[in-house]
Amino acid sequence: MESQTSDKRINVLVLITAMDRAGAETMMMNYLRHIDRNKIHMDFVLNREYESDYEKEIKELGSKVYHLSPIYPNTVREYKKEFKKFLKEHPNYDVIHSNLEERSAYPLAIAKKAGIDLRIVHAHSNLKHVDIKYIFRLYLRKKLRGKYTHSFACSRGTAKWLFGDDKKTIIVRNAIDTDEFKYDENLRKKAREELGIDDDTLLIGHVGRFSYEKNHKYLLRTFAEVNKMKPNSRLVLIGGGKNRSELRLKDEIIKTIEELNLQDKVIMLGVRDDMPYIMQAIDIFALPSLSEGFPLTLMEAQSLGLKCIVSDNVPKECNVTGEVKYLSANTPPDEAAWELLLLKDKKVDPIEMNRKVKAAGYDIKTNAMWLERVYSKAILNEQEENKVLKTNDRRMKLMKAWYHLKAKIKKLVYKIIYGRRLKIGKGTTWRHGFHITIEGGQVEIGENCFFNNYCSINSLKKVTIGDGTIFGSNCHIYDHNHRFSDLETSIKAQGYTLGETHIGKHCWFGTNVVVLKGVAIGDNCVIGAGVVVSEDVPEGTIVGR
């Protein structure tokens, strides 16, 4: 099958309400900054007349920005006319990437008729507040069916809200530049000096636009209780708003600050374009949201090594460092204040937290490479080629049946020898020369894995392999290594160093790969032929020699 990828640059049209400094907008901005713009060209269609925060930078990066009517019930007809006309005047787009969620039903129906065969809908929100707007969104969610070719979501919760139980939905990480969001003692001192915060002052920070979901008033009431117990404390609010509802809420927030007599205790910074710098000043990051999809700011806070306390409306999958404290959204402010103050003396390692964010697969560099492959249809082509390779050849079916039978026999033998030390999932099979050696360790292999000729697993501690992972010929996996530091003792007599080895789900290992002890390889990784894996590999990474 001829590949659809070529040297031709792929033209992507991003649909989004505005490009202000908020979660989904910053996420798309991160991808634009780090994607290979020689291969992928991204333009933006916005539904607000004003100039957005990121608009200038978008243009500096070589992309275009277009403004169409908003998508309100009374302006839908006008929007549809404008978008239909837009696609006729700009027929060069290969991909539509819509961040309009259920409102994508309108533009994607038009894009489908226009013959754009890669139409992506991206879910960012997980609504819980029921009102008239909620009911309208439910109606549009039904209209969305059949209009898109691919569904993206930032979390499982947002996926379920927009797409139901669609198992084809891809979780796309709200990735950040972990090198930018890295703790720096000098920057921290400078940022605190700018804010007038001394070393003894506890600074609680919140980042978010002025919206009902961010729960600012609850945060202010909680901080008022904190300040009673620790007068030498301050709260900094970073973020803002431009539309009428956001500006109205801002006025209410200011009024609440005055009612609580916190004028000298709360710092309102508005929108900042230097988040990696100004967030360094914060001691504890607070996010008491009533509803969240997958807050990018929480990833930034963890990457910086901040202590974090959030409501239970924030998805648990956001806690990639294991250091995030969750509280019920119904916790009374005085109790929440105690919990917040308990974090004050908690010890965290900022360098280790940054490493964990990167290892969990949330660094933008690797994720941008993945998105390039989606836009260029490389991943789609691979899926199609796999379908073509499925043969009805009777001889191949007989060979596969023979391999499965041999694997079942060998599994029984291994079970007798190793007992509970070995677990092998259903559908896992191998070809000639596959071998498992367990000397005091454990091996857990998921379902539907495949090992080609002469692969081996050698365990003294623990090796785990996720579902659907496949190995080319002559791959070898270890969870131990020889000691060799003592020059006066033979290597054989020095014993081993041990470290658990973990391989994620749906990975592909080329021929002659060696995986060494203590390595963690994330889900959906591709390890090229001949690679020796000696360091952690983040989820979704392609590793070549």
Image (cartoon, helix red, strand yellow):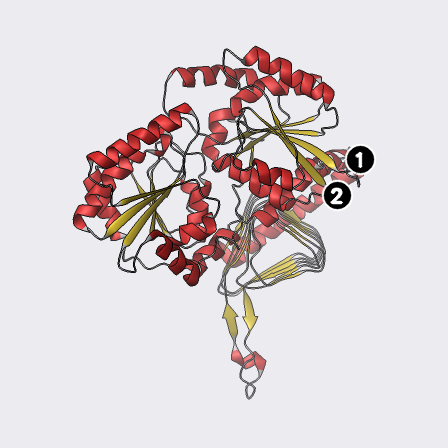
**Amino acid type for the residue under numbered disc 1:** Asp
Residue at far right of view: 2
Q: Mark 1: give few (<14), some (14-19) or many (20+) Cα within 10 Å.
A: few
Q: Secondary structure at mark 1?
A: loop
The residue beneath circle 2 is 399
Toward the viewer: 120 or 133?
A: 133
**Residue 133 x %, y %:** 42, 17
For residue 393, the mark is 1
**Amino acid type for the residue under numbered disc 2:** Met
At 70% from the left and 21% from the top, the residue drawn is 87
At 36% from the left and 57% from the top, the residue drawn is 193
- Left or right of residue 336, residue 468 in this image: right
Label 2 vs label 1: CA separation? 10 Å
Give the quadrant of the N terminus.
top right
**Residue 425 x %, y %:** 55, 45
Q: Is residue 109 above or below residue 429?
A: above
Observer able to see residue 146: no
Closer to us: mark 2 or mark 1?
1
At 57% from the left and 44% from the top, the residue drawn is 467
Toward the viewer: 353 or 443?
A: 353
Residue at far bottom of view: 488
Residue at far left of view: 228
Q: Secondary structure at mark 2?
A: helix
Among the two numbered marks 2 and 1 on one chain, the one whose residue lies closer to the N terminus: 1
